[in-house]
Amino acid sequence: MMTAARRSSPQKPPSHPWRMFQNVSLGLLAWLIALAFFFPILWMIFSAFKTEDQAFATPPIIFFQPIFDNFVKAFAKYGHALLNSLLVAFGSTILSFVLGLPAAFSMVFYPTKRSRGTLLWFVSTKMMPPVGVIVPLYLIFKDLHLLDTVWGLTLMYTTMNMPLVIWMMHSYISEIPSEILEAAKVDGASLMQEFFNIAMPLATPGIASTALLCLIFAWNEAFFALNLTNVDAAPLSVYISAFKTSEGLFWAGLSAAATLVILPVMAFGWSAQRQLIQGLTMGAVK
Amino acid sequence: MKSKTWIIGAGLATSAVVAAIATAAIAQGPVTVTIATVNNSDMKTMESLTSVFEAANPDIKLKWNVLPENELRQKVTTDIATGAGSYDVATIGTYEVPIWAKNGWLNSVDDLFTKNASIKSSYDLNDILTPVRLGLSYNKTLYALPFYAESSMTFYNKAAFAANKLTMPVKPTWNQIAGFAAKLHKPQNGFYGICLRGLPGWGENMAVFTTMVNTFGGRWFDPQWNATVDSPAWKAALTFYVNLQKKYGAPGSTGNGFTENLTYMSQNKCGMWIDATVAAGFLKDPKQSKIVDTVGFANAPTGPGTPKGSNWLWSWSLAIPKSSKVADAAFKFITWATSKEYIALVAKTNGTWASVPPGTRKSTYANPEYQKAAGDFAGITLDSINRADPTNATKDPVPYVGVQFVGIPEFQALGTQVGQYIAGALAGQYSVSQALKLGQAAATKVAKEGGYKK
């Protein structure tokens, strides 16, 4: 009886030593791959606690007395840049959604004959290499007094992230059955009610994962930040570049600054891992 | 309900963004001077002394934009060329100053001295070393003030020399350097005969290699702007460089720039290193170096062609872009940061004269305290800077100014391109002849397309 039950149960793990060996090997391989991917970050964090000559030493030093001097120096200008990064990343994400969500909604439920073309046009703006537009952009920013302003960089990142919002949200909203909206219309719902009370609650997982991607892209962007800001609006990507020098050793200091820069974005990522994976697989890939 | 919360949340966040922007825009105090600079240690010291300047000049506030060298050049160029006026002071080098002055991008320092007679009388412009001053002039007008200056020299490990019974002459030749490298090279012990830049770039491998070309008797262009990269002198220099690096160089030579070689040298892994005089201070700094007591200094090596152009000249300088709206305040700052008083202030603040910005003023080298602190290398640095003549750096005449560069705007791209061919020869990707042929084609193209060759 017992044997029969064991045979019939598909959930029971196989007890064959070969299968066990396979499972353990696969597990080990997965850990090794994960470690290989994480190793550069781990090494960077280690280097942040070393002196400059320890960080540069060959062969590499594994055991050392950790120091905190690099973090003390890195903290000196961190606060202002962190505030700018938070304002720009969240500001541009909110603006991208304010403009992009209604656009995606209308293209799904109220399409015109040009909707498809417009959707493709939105994504085509992502194909332009940033360096190709920097001079005209710089001149426009100069004339509008937007250079070195948080507002200017927020606008820039909004234009960068809005196509992403429209595409990903178009994909999510398309999954909402049109019958639900039709039923709401029959019950007398207005357009605004359809949007806010029906479509948005159903698209919440998509909004969360798209917002996270927008935040990460805005957080990591360096080219426009380096070119369009100087001192007042410089975000963390500009802050970190200041640690590089052409004369002298700088790896330990740079590692400390980089550790501080990635901490917030790693926290975002960890806290929303599930939505991020969902967003990547269901939004952009679909 | 949920949607209302969402709207309120979005509204509040947007308001917060706008409020923060508005606050930043309103917050304006006295005249603000924005300085674009690099993260080198002397500049970091200058930034740390901001409060001293602001206390003495309460009507001026300083703002610092610190960037890596290449980004700084690109950004300041865009800013000045478009007249945006984001920067009031730009930290630029001997290469840029004459080119930018020719473009009409910089305020004349001479004019500003004339306008501010009181500053002129206290500044003592004649105290600035003549080659440095000439390097920052265009059409006999000064366009920038030197913050610190450097040439190139030879660093060597005295302990390794003694162990191998070798003696470094004060003025070595490249052939002697190759002989020493052969005897010092012990790769099995992790000790290499010589460290030289191999990382491609006009300011990286090409700085060292162009001085080699000069002293081997070569030049980039003849007076009619015919490229001479495929000349016998270039071939001799490149063959020598590639053999020296391949036989006795540190590993990964095509990835080694200033920083990597400084590490090899300071970690007691290299017998000799030919590079910027500013490295002397780093090699004598116990926080960075393991060879503080055993590092020796000599002049940059000379080759078989001519002693001219064997050591470069570079100065990091402070210039005021034409687009600055507060040129007078900026002038007050640059004259403060390059003054004798500033140099004394750095010595007082750091507790040693060895860490003052070097290479700019005669008075620094005449100061007994500086001589005491930097005695090992002060004399060679001063002598090297005084010998470096950007207007006469080659055996045969040339139509350009510059020791380790050609003073034309196109050189940044050309130098980096040829630098890649040189690195290709070092990596075995090209033969010496192939690399030079490619370099010759690139230089010829620049001469033609730049309108230099008639």
Image: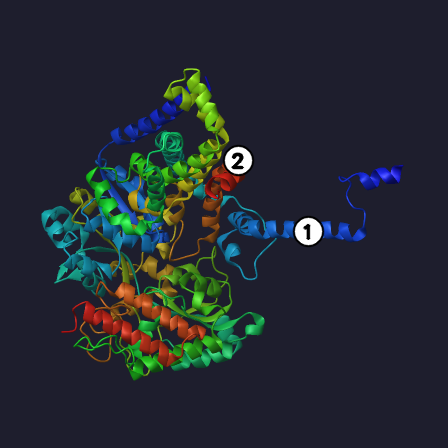
In the image, which disc is placed on residue A26?
Answer: 1
Query: Count the marks: how many?
Result: 2
Position in image of residue B208 (x %, y %): 35, 70
**In which quarter of the view is residue A10 placed?**
top right
In this view, the residue in front, B183 or A6, is A6
Above or below for B24 versus A64: above
Q: The residue marked by circle 2 belongs to what chain?
A: A
Which residue is rendered at x = 24% and y = 71% of the image?
Answer: B445
Residue B5 seen in the figure = no
Above or below for A170 versus A285: above
Position in image of residue B68 (x %, y %): 35, 52
Which residue is rendered at x = 30% and y = 84% of the image?
Answer: B232
How far apart marks 1 and 2 lie (CA) works out to 26 Å
Residue A238 seen in the figure = yes
Mark 1 crowd level (few <14, some 14–19, many ≥20, 10 Å Cα): few
Above or below for B16 versus B1: below
Instruction: Give SS at disc 1.
Output: helix
Residue carrying label 2: A275
Q: Amino acid at mark 2?
A: Gln
Position in image of residue B306 (x %, y %): 28, 81
1 or 2: tag closer to the N-terminus: 1
In the displayed orientation, state which residue is furthest to the right: A1
Mark 2 crowd level (few <14, some 14–19, many ≥20, 10 Å Cα): many
Q: The residue marked by circle 1 belongs to what chain?
A: A
Side of B142 relative to B435 (left or right)? left
In this view, the residue in front, A220 or B214, is A220
Q: Quadrant of the N terminus of chain A?
A: top right
Instruction: Give SS at disc 2.
Output: helix
